[in-house]
Image (cartoon, helix red, strand yellow):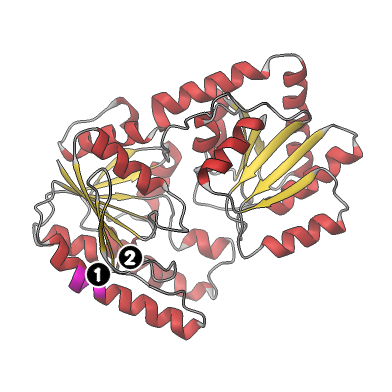
Amino acid sequence: MKILLVTGNFAAPGINPWLLDDLADSFVSAGHEVDVVVHSPTAPRPRELRVGPSGIRVLSVGAVSAPGSAIAKLRSYLATGFRLHTTGARFASTGAYDLCVYTSIGLFSFGFPSRVRRRGTAARLLFVMWDFFPVHQVEIGRIRPAVLAPFLKRLERMSIRRSDVVAVMSAANEKYLKSYHRSLSADVIQIPPWASDAQPTSPLPVKRERFTAIFGGQLVKGRGVDTLLDAAKLLELDGLPIDILIAGDGSDAAELRKRATELKLTNVSFLGSLHREIYRTVLQTSHVGIAVTVPGISPPSFPSKIVEYCANGLPVLVCVEASSDAGEYVQSNGAGLAAPAGDAPAIARALGQLLSEHNAGLLEQSGIRARSLFLSAMSSHQAVATMVAAASGTRTETSK
């Protein structure tokens, strides 16, 4: 097959590999040909066509420098959309694609994938819905005023209405999709977030002496890291020897560091943004991975960090909103525990239980099951198999 990926995020100098990089590599490994159009209005990269060692052609039509002001960002978004429909359209017209894949937020692809499908440049169009826009952003306070939500929702629906297939992350996501976008006629399949296989260093990294839990992700609204800090304080008060590492950066990083200082936490370390390979090594020296969000959110999430933890053989503590089935998914597969989002005492108790399992020599089996779950359902190779099956009108087990 010939595949076109349309994305706002793809590896470049200074930009870590991401889920779409892993997907592209797995498509190539499976014998498919891949072109990528990158359209980031904010993450600067050279505006050029590059061909990687594996033959993947990558065309960037986005920003070459980071816009500073709000006006500059608006101009960059508009210019990127224009270039998608000029430079990007000329690039895509040179290939007859069997499948075009793009991801949420669909609005920010500026209608380009729909154009590719409408003109027959791509035989099938597959939209990956990781994010129910704009309801999630409104509920976590990232979009204000909320009066904009109905208009933005209509634009989002327009961006995905020509999709032949919509991929959601879980059964809860599929149920929510059918109530949120009632008019969609696309086939719906389930594909959890994916990652490439984590290659352990040799020799294997030694686990840290003190029991260590790690959170890796953006430090922005809706992540619930403030609750994790509150749980860390409770662990200190209880005298439990548990350290918490926080890897990542974002707009809330300074505020979270300040909160940790105010709480006088000695069991929390902020690592900042790490290169992917360094991050994976840190994961392999830790004992547990933490996925945490905020309560009261209606669209169910499935944090992609769960996949990285499982790929690296880490048991997972999943603390997500009640609408999500991610915690149940991990716990039912014996790969970790679930606790409610926003409940610091429950998170602290769960970490204490995981410490007890570690001390009893039982936690290693949870890590083995987490790794097995990754290989069977959450690797980028599995995602490719499911997408190819959907493009050819068949289904694989992971799509059920």
Number of numbered labels in the structure image: 2
Residue 371 seen in this snapshot: yes
| Mark 1 or mark 2, earlier in chain | 2
- Whole-Å distance between the Cαs marked 1 and 2? 7 Å
The magenta-colored residue range is: 83-87
Which residue is rendered at x = 26% and y = 34% of the image?
29
Going by the numbered disc 2, the residue's amino acid type is His
> In the visual, does 48 lie left or right of 197?
left
Going by the numbered disc 1, the residue's amino acid type is Leu
Residue 242 lies in the magenta stretch: no
Q: Are marks 1 and 2 in contact (CB under 8 Å)?
A: yes
In the picture of the structure, the residue carrying the numbered disc 1 is: 84
Q: Residues within 10 Å of mark 2 (few under 14, many from 20)?
A: many
Residue 85 lies in the magenta stretch: yes
Q: Residues within 10 Å of mark 1 (few under 14, many from 20)?
A: many
Residue 237 at x, y percent in the picture = 91, 40
Residue 86 at x, y percent in the picture = 18, 73
Which residue is rendered at x = 68% and y = 15% of the image?
362
> In the visual, does 221 lie left or right of 35?
right
Residue 325 seen in this snapshot: no
Task: Give SS at disc 1.
Answer: helix
Of residues 96 and 294, the one drawn nearer to the viewer in this rendering: 96
Quarter of the rendering containing residue 233:
top right
In the picture of the structure, the residue carrying the numbered disc 2 is: 39
